[in-house]
Amino acid sequence: MTRLTSIWLVLTSLCAAPALAQTPAPAPPPAQPAPPSIAWKDGKTRITLGGAYLEISNRVQFRFTQEFPDDSIRLAGTEEAGDSRGSFRIRRAKFKLEGWMYKPWLSYEVQLNWANLASSNPGSALEDAAFDIDFSKGKGALRLHAGQFKPPFGGQELTSSGSQIFVDRALATNSFFRGRDIGIALWGVTANNRIEWRAGMFNGNGPTRGANDNGKYQYNARLMWQPNGSQNLNTRAWVSGPLYSESDFESTAAPIYAVALNWENQNNFTATSGNDQKWNAYSVDGIFKFRGFSANGMYTIAQRTPEAGPSFDASGGFIQAGQLFNDRRFEVAARYGQFDPTDLADDNVTRELRGAFNYYYARHGLKWQTDVGRVEIATVPGAPARTVELRTQLQFVF
């Protein structure tokens, strides 16, 4: 009995002993973020880190211009009327940062133009400084663009100076579309990529200003219709894609084309300057591309009211076309444009007629452009002043 009792006590103590602790399975290693990458394409360096990316690019335009005025014009720096003048120039030298942060639908753009440091407003070296929010999170249906950028007014003005067929924009474009400003804009596209709309409110006194110069704002709106929906209008950038690039490097089996309506309301009346103006301006522009052929044009009318004196209308436009050949490396183009600064005066129309020949080594990323044209300014009835210009320009993006 004693032996049985001892065995029983041993078995009871073994059953009551705590279970041996089990070794836990090793925890999986933490997920490693994707390694950073650096890639170069079309002159842009893209740095990707943690899903977000930053693109860095530079663009330089080195230009030579030779002017041949008629005998009624004396150019600055020449000895007599009719003397020609040649000059080299860095027309533009731009540095750009763009990308998205935190989420793909939160994007930004900052651009500097070093050539503007020599202007009367050195602050205009800052061209773009804008933040974009896509409230539809990638669909492009409703977006907010805020900061300093180009108001939605005029197709050629919205098209980058680096994506032009000619060495520079048409004179009529420079007369009606005033470039960058500070403000906000809403924009979006339809799901079928047929309509793009934009509307914005701006100070109205140009880029990089410390404050609005009066209590009024500039209002702009643009509605672009692409009937065949062939191009993706939902792009991250405020302005990008084949419809905002003049030569046809993109079309294949189907044409690329669109037409747009534009509106601007501006009031420049201030208490400190001279005879300022306010106006409503209406504009239509369009673009067509197919198999290396491209054409685009614009017509604008502005109903202007000065602080003193009668109201008047200013009007003008241009049309231009180009044809690429030899595997889309060479291009010939022609342009005609004119604008009338006021309908209250006769024989005061400025006219522009140009032809161009271009060589594209890497599309707009590396190209050499040459154009020659005649500018006619009718300052005296029946005796317009004429100047012939030869311009040649190298553009490189890196």
Image (tube, helix red, strand yellow):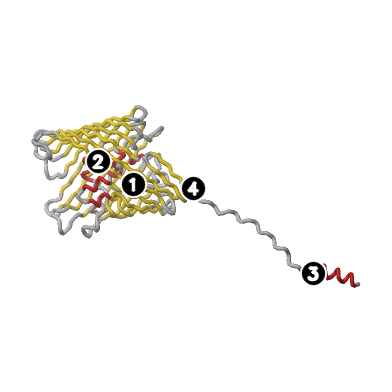
Instruction: Tell me how far mark 1 sits from mark 3, CA to CA.
Output: 79 Å
Q: In this picture, is 44 found above or below 360?
A: below
Residue receiving disc 1:
96
Instruction: Tell me how far mark 1 sits from mark 4, CA to CA.
Output: 24 Å
Instruction: Tell me how far mark 2 sits from mark 1, CA to CA.
Output: 17 Å
**Residue at figure coordinates x 24%, y 34% from the top left:** 392
Q: Earlier in the sequence, mark 4 or mark 2?
A: 4
Amino acid type assigned to the residue bearing label 3 in the image: Ser
Residue receiving disc 2:
90
Q: Are marks 1 and 3 in contact (CB under 8 Å)?
A: no
Residue situated in front as seen by the camera: 166 or 175: 166
Where is the N terminus found, in terms of image quarters? bottom right
Amino acid type assigned to the residue bearing label 1 in the image: Lys
**Residue at figure coordinates x 43%, y 42% from the top left:** 39
| Secondary structure of the residue carrying numbered label 3 | helix
Q: Residues within 10 Å of mark 1 (few under 14, many from 20)?
A: some
Q: Earlier in the sequence, mark 1 or mark 4?
A: 4
Residue situated in front as seen by the camera: 257 or 207: 207
x and y, in percent, of residue 152 in the image: 30, 48
Q: Earlier in the sequence, mark 1 or mark 3?
A: 3
